[in-house]
Image: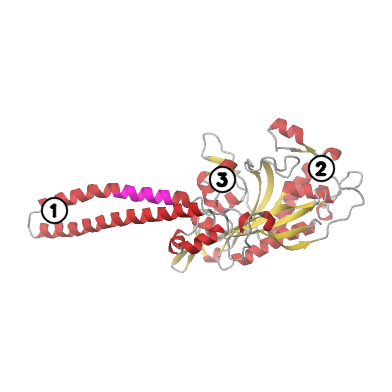
Amino acid sequence: MIDLKYLQKNFDEASLTLQKKGVEAETLQTLQGLFADLKQANQALEALKAEQNSLSKLFGQHKRDGKDTTVLKSELDGLKESIVPLQERAREAEEALYSVALTIPNFPDDSVPKGADEAENVEIRKVLEPRTFDFVPLEHWALAEKNGWIDFERGVKLAKSRFSVLRGEAARLERVLINFFLDANAKKGFIEQSVPFMSNAAMLQGTGQLPKFEDDLFKIEEENLYLIPTAEVPLTNLYHDEILKAEELPRLMTAYTPCFRKEAGSAGRDTRGMIRQHQFNKVEMVAIAHPDSSDEIFDMMVENASDILTALGLPHRVVELCGGDLGFSAARTIDLEVWLPGQNKYREISSISNTRDFQARRAKIRFKDGKKNRLVHTLNGSALAVGRTIVAIMENYQNADGSIEIPEVLKKYM
């Protein structure tokens, strides 16, 4: 959650920053009105409490002096009754403010470029040259049919659209990639975790999926549980409501999990193939970091994901997201986009974000800094999305007869 004290004290400046991320002026005006309501409710409550304290002291003095306290007691009883509705009013005003604040995205870093959508993202660099084919390269679904790797029809039969079944070498390649990614992350110091594939509502609120994005989550009926949309949720919340020692930072973690998303806002997009599925596998990196070192860790995570793609021989580019394309919790995001020759375009395969203290404030993740408790910074990123990596290998390593080579680095795994 954003720092409400900062927002209140620097409202105009903060509003301009949030508008860079597409927050509407009407929402900010509502928030400003809720600040005023809470301030007014608290002032009225504090005034009555001050009067109560003053009369209580006078009551005690009169009692010690043997004076009649009948009138004072009646006044105190009346004040006590009057305070109750004011306390309720202040509580309601605070809840209303907090409810809206939970839907406000993180402040983007000053370095984030302005822009309305992905068309205005900024390319930083390209890594590896795309292969030149002496035949027309096929898209992955056509290659899947030739090789019997992916069964889309039976995936629909077993579940519904946007589910698929991997067969034979594709299923084996999926398993191999998970191991390869985890091993690569371990070499960078990320400790492997095995986490639940469900999280409760408090954990999803901690990382920013709730309440704003509930429509994109799969809810377990009659349970306070959701299927996780990413391992970022359980990994970050391992330290939910905890105070770490400064010397324990950073905590670097990695995990393989399936991810479940309704893709509610993607109707009509990537309806064919494996690019956008309701269930997909991913290996995630998460860092719980000291604020002074989070930028350095962010750069390391970007480099690690890029190195994995390079090791696989997959051409890709590194892209800085503009304000309008930045995710809800992110202060800064770098995307890695892999080249897909069948589609003749780059497609996102990893998204690495520094959320600064936004998630930590929601999830109450702190560290001891001398005598003070401070909020950590949290970072997350894919290394990598498994299904999209399979797609990239299929399209980049295809032969004229439709057969598919295996990247050299994976042969020892296969």
Q: Distance between the residues labelled 2 and 3?
A: 36 Å
Image coordinates for residue 202, horizontal then vertical, percent: 50, 47
Q: Nearer the viewer, mark 2 or mark 3?
A: 3
Q: Which amino acid does label 3 sit on?
A: Phe
Image coordinates for residue 97, horizontal then vertical, percent: 43, 51
Residue 51 lies in the magenta stretch = no
User: Residue drawn at (8%, 60%), measured in percent from left and top?
Assistant: 65
Say what secondary structure mark 2 lies in. Answer: helix
Residue to which mark 1 is pinned: 72
User: Residue drawn at (44%, 66%), measured in percent from left and top?
Assistant: 372
Q: Which of marks 1 and 2 is in front?
A: 1
Question: Which callout, 1 or 3, points at the residue further toward the start of the chain?
Answer: 1
Q: Residues within 10 Å of mark 3 (few under 14, many from 20)?
A: some
Residue to which mark 2 is pinned: 169
Residue to which mark 3 is pinned: 213
Q: Do the residues labelled 1 and 2 touch (CB within 8 Å)?
A: no
Q: Which amino acid does label 2 sit on?
A: Glu
Q: What residue type is labelled 1?
A: Leu
User: Residue drawn at (10%, 50%), measured in percent from left and top?
Assistant: 70
Magenta stretch: dominant secondary structure: helix
Q: How crowded is mark 1: few (under 14 residues within 10 Å), some or many (20 or more)?
A: some
Q: What stretch is highlighted in magenta?
A: 86-97
User: Residue drawn at (18%, 51%), measured in percent from left and top?
Assistant: 76
